[in-house]
Structure formats: structure tokens, C-alpha cells
Amino acid sequence: MTAEAYAKLHSTIAPQDFGRVAVLYGGKSAEREVSLKSGAAVIDALQSAGVDVVAIDVGDDLLTRLLNEKIDRAFIILHGRGGEDGSMQGLLECLGIPYTGSGILASALAMDKLRTKQVWQSLGIPTPLHTVLASEADCISAGAELGFPLIVKPAHEGSSIGMAKVSSVAELIAAWKDAANYDSQVLVEQWIQGPEFTVAVLRDQVLPPIALGTPHSFYDYDAKYLASDTQYRIPCGLDAAKEQELIDLTARACDAIGIAGWGRVDVMQDEQGRFWLLEVNTAPGMTDHSLVPMAARAAGLDFQQLVLAILAASVEARG
């Protein structure tokens, strides 16, 4: 990373100039527990920096609280539906409150794994072959068309909730039924055998990629948030040319969706060395196990500097 690129990551705004900042966390999605942890870390970092913070665990009284607290801007650290899907962004737009992260359209697109893939495919950005499941017949057809193993995902969830790797039609049917408990739209995609990478973006800069390793069958919820044996490698182990290819592909994928402020892209590399884009997260985790803080540290930013940089991007985008 060049000195100029590094400088762009930092906030040059004095903490008091952010005004009264609402940290929106918790909420009602399936990722509530992760959001509570992320929110607590963000609140602590902002308060330690001297920012005037109002902590709001998002519930039915959200609109009243936003109006009564005289909020100047919002830090969205809600994960999943109700926070990352464009609905919160739409409410804040209506209220005229600037906020962190991507806008309405990009948030809604990124939350929908199927439509994210369709946008990428239309631009020639590589993403695994996939289809939508709505019946046992679909499962049988998908197994025949895509082959096994496969990965099953609720189309609008994050944190690997409801995901499963399957190796037979029977397992696929069971996984589809389980995923349907979380989402009416269930996605199944080809399994890419090879290393997994995650790449964070911050203020239009791509942070150092992280290589992930886990003894689990894939990087599931337990590996992300609970396990002590998950491995993270920075530098990621790619040669310089291949790492630059990954960085360029990530930037292109984010630009296609319209990602702003910050985000994180998940990528697989197959046995031939080709990269395959899985999804993009517009409000990634900020817990002690989370990946964006790791990438930021590798770029020279501590957690407080990262949080302030994310908040500063809200000023630049919508100030």
C-alpha cells in the first residue's frame, strides 16, 4: 500500500465535529447477538475517542429515539435484515440523517446473494454456478446440474446462518428445508475446492487480503465467532501478482454493487488458481473475532482509528 493510499484511510475530522452520533446495533435479525458484540466494541471506541455517542439497541421505538435524541449522524453496525438490506438506510435518508456504509440500493443488492451474483455475472465477474431451490424437485435437478458437493445458503442471511455443505440429494433436501426456516429464498451453489480469502475495503482503498483456514467443513458460524482453532494469515500467502489480481477483482466487484464507505468481500480460489466471488458484506462484524479489524491492523490502523475512518466516510459521502 502506497503512502498516499495509507493516508486516505485515516480520519482527519476532530471527534467533536461528528456531532451527536447514534450507534445503531442489536436489532431483530438472526444476527442480533453478533451485532450486540460489534456495537459494544464500536461504542467503546467512539466514546474513548471523545465522540458524543448515543447507543441505540434498535427496536420498535427507533423512530422516536432518533427524533428525540437530535442525532447528527448514525453509525450502522446492524448485521442482516433490518440493518444491511437498505431499509435502515431508507429511514435515515427520509430523516435527513447521514450514516455510515453503503446507500439504499447497494445495501439491498448486497444483502440479496442471488441478485449480487446476477450483477456480477452480467459484468463477467466470476461467481460460482448456482440456482434457487423451492422444492424437492429443484434439489434433485440442482444435484444433477451442478454436481456434488454443493453449498446451501439462505439468500438474505449473513454470518453463515442456515448454511450447509452437502454431498448427496438427501442431504441437499434436508439442508434446503433447514435454510427455508430462515428465508423463503434458498440458494445452492457449486462448491469451490481451495483456499478462502476475505478482502476488506475502507474509504475506496482495498485492505490487505486475509487467508482463512478452519478444520470445519467450511467457514461456518462457529468458525467465525466461537472457535479458537480458526486460522488467519496476513500476508495471505499469494505471490505479488496473484494478490494484486485479488485486490483488483475485489475493487471491481464492490464498484459493480456500489459499495461505499466500507465493506468486506468473500472469495474462493479453486485448484487452478482462479478466484470466485461469493458475496459482499456492507456492515461486517466488528467483534474480537472479526476480519475487518484484522485487515485494518495490517494496514496500520488500530480499532479506534478504523471506527473513526468509517464514521468519517459518512461525512465525505453525505455531509
Image: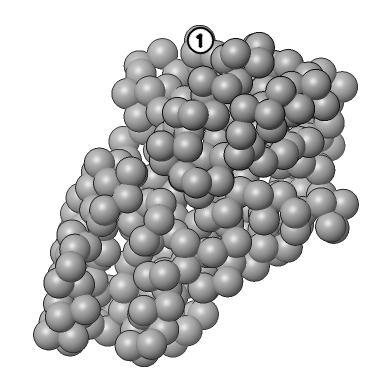
Q: Is residue 255 left or right of residue 215?
A: right
Q: Is 55 left, or right, of 279 in this rendering?
A: left
Image: 75 above or below 244: below
Judge by depth and name the residue closer to the eye, 225 or 289.
225
User: Is residue 175 in sight in this rendering?
Assistant: yes
Above or below, comparing residue 233 to residue 309 in the picture = above
Residue 250 image position (x, y, % from top left): 70, 49
Circle 1 is placed at which residue position?
Answer: 215
- Which residue is at a point 60% across and 21% down the rendered structure image? 172
Q: Which percent across, then down, holds residue 216? A: 49, 13
Colour convention of the picture: one colour
Can you give x and y, in whole percent of width and height, for residue 249 in the image?
A: 77, 48
Counting labels gives: 1
> As displayed, is residue 34 above or below residue 231?
below
Mark 1 surroundings within 10 Å by alpha-carbon count, few (fewer than 14), some (14 through 19), many (20 or more): few
Inspect the image, locate mark 1, and give the three-letter code of the amino acid beneath it. Answer: Pro
Left or right, residue 228 beside residue 24 = right
Q: Position of residue 116 (x, y in %)?
A: 67, 54
Towards the viewer: 206 or 259: 259
Image vertical order of residue 113 relative to residue 60, above or below: above
Residue 14 vs residue 102, the one in the foreground? 102
Q: Quadrant of the C terminus?
A: bottom left
- Mark 1, secondary structure of its residue: loop
Q: Would residue 47 appear left or right of 9 to someone viewing this image?
A: left
